[in-house]
């Protein structure tokens, strides 16, 4: 990998700043000052220091975000704030992307990573990774709705959903529920409730596979996954 790419990934500034850093002799590769950003190195085998500090290279990052409403699940957008905009430069330089999407007005768990293999594993329809949501519903949610969801309901485009688990927390004029689905169609939770004549007024994702939303994270806050959380995800637990 190019030395300047390594420095960029590790958050050492813009291309202009890195050129200045290299020119100053602050970057040492295997004991020798490195002046050229195009120099090819193996970050796992060769020692690189900047101002005497050894670089510990890592290829992937895994960030658990409590997505706030009003922010879109995209890497860039000219009009709206994106989930990537919420990250500091030392994480955004790894070019992470959201694993799946949450609607603009939906809150909760969103995984950001640059690991394409793990993303594919979590999103592949063949893997049947469960996703659990909490929702507030305008209208009384009944046991009949739960039974319908268990069998699969027809959406407005004629698609019949896979079986889903609907747990009624509170039923009334305004109901509260938890719903676990095994797929991720566009606006799926909202459209499922529309199919039984009800409207979702608040939606929050609680979990995706083994990964659960950290209750200590406020809206817009994030942290990197623990080794245990990552291992569980990678193992498909």
Image: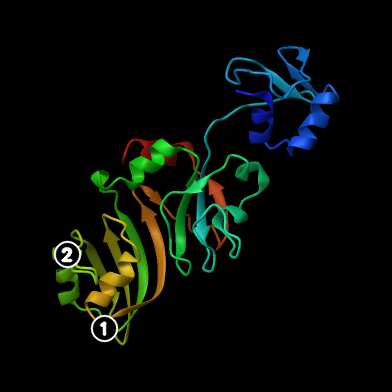
Q: Is residue 13 visible?
A: no
Residues packed near mark 2 inside 10 Å, few (<14), some (14 to 19) or many (20 plus): some
User: Please, is residue 167 above or below residue 22 in the view?
Assistant: below
Is residue 41 left or right of 113 when viewed as pictured?
right
Which of the two labelled residues, at mark 2 and mark 1, occupies the earlier sequence position? 1
Residue marked by disc 1 = 140
Q: Residue at x 60, y 27 (%)?
A: 57
Q: Give the colouring mode of the picture.
A: rainbow
Contact, CB < 8 Å: mark 2 with mark 1? no
Q: Is residue 96 left or right of residue 6?
A: left
**Residue 224 at x, y percent in the picture:** 54, 44
Task: Name the residue tied to disc 2.
Answer: 152
Which mark, residue 10? none
Q: Label 2 vs label 1: CA separation?
A: 19 Å
In the image, residue 143 sits, relative to residue 178, either above or below, namely: below
Residue 167: x and y in percent read 25, 68
Q: Quadrant of residue 27?
A: top right
Image quarter (top left, top right, bottom left or bottom right) of the N terminus: top right
Residue 55 appears in the picture as rendered: yes
Q: Farthest top residue?
A: 31
Depth check, front residue: 99 or 35: 35
Image coords of residue 73 (percent x, y): 49, 58
Quadrant of the image occupied by residue 228: top left
For the C terminus, the quadrant is top left
Q: How many marks?
A: 2
For the point 20% across and 62% down, which residue is it?
161
**Is 228 on the left-hand or right-hand side of 24?**
left
Structural crowding at the residue carrying mark 1, measured as other residues with C-alpha within 10 Å and reported as few (<14), some (14–19) or many (≥20):
some
1 lies left or right of 64: right
Callout 2: SS = loop
Residue drawn at (15%, 76%) of the image? 144
Residue occupying image coordinates x 22% and y 78%: 196
């Amino acid at each position: 990998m190019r030395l300047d790419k390594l420095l960029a990934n590790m958050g050492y500034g813009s291309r202009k700043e890195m050129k200045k850093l290299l020119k100053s002799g602050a970057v040492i590769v295997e004991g020798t000052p490195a002046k050229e950003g195009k120099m090819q190195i193996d970050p796992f085998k060769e020692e690189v220091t900047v101002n005497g500090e050894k670089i510990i290279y890592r290829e992937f990052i895994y960030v658990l975000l409590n997505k706030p409403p009003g922010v879109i699940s995209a890497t860039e957008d000219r009009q709206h704030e994106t989930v990537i905009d919420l990250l500091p430069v030392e994480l955004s330089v790894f070019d992470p992307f959201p694993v799946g999407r949450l609607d603009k007005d939906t809150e909760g768990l969103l995984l950001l990573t640059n690991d394409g293999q793990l993303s594919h594993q979590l999103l592949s329809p063949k893997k049947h990774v469960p996703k659990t949501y909490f929702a507030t519903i305008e209208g009384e949610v009944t046991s009949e709705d739960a039974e319908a969801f268990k069998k699969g309901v027809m959406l407005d485009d004629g698609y019949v959903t896979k079986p889903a688990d609907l747990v009624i927390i509170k039923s009334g004029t305004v109901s509260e529920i938890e719903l676990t689905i095994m797929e991720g169609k566009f606006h799926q939770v909202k459209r499922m409730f529309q199919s039984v004549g009800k409207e979702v007024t608040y939606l929050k994702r609680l979990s995706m596979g083994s990964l659960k939303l950290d209750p200590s994270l406020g809206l817009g806050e994030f942290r990197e996954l623990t080794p245990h959380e990552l291992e569980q995800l990678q193992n498909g637990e």
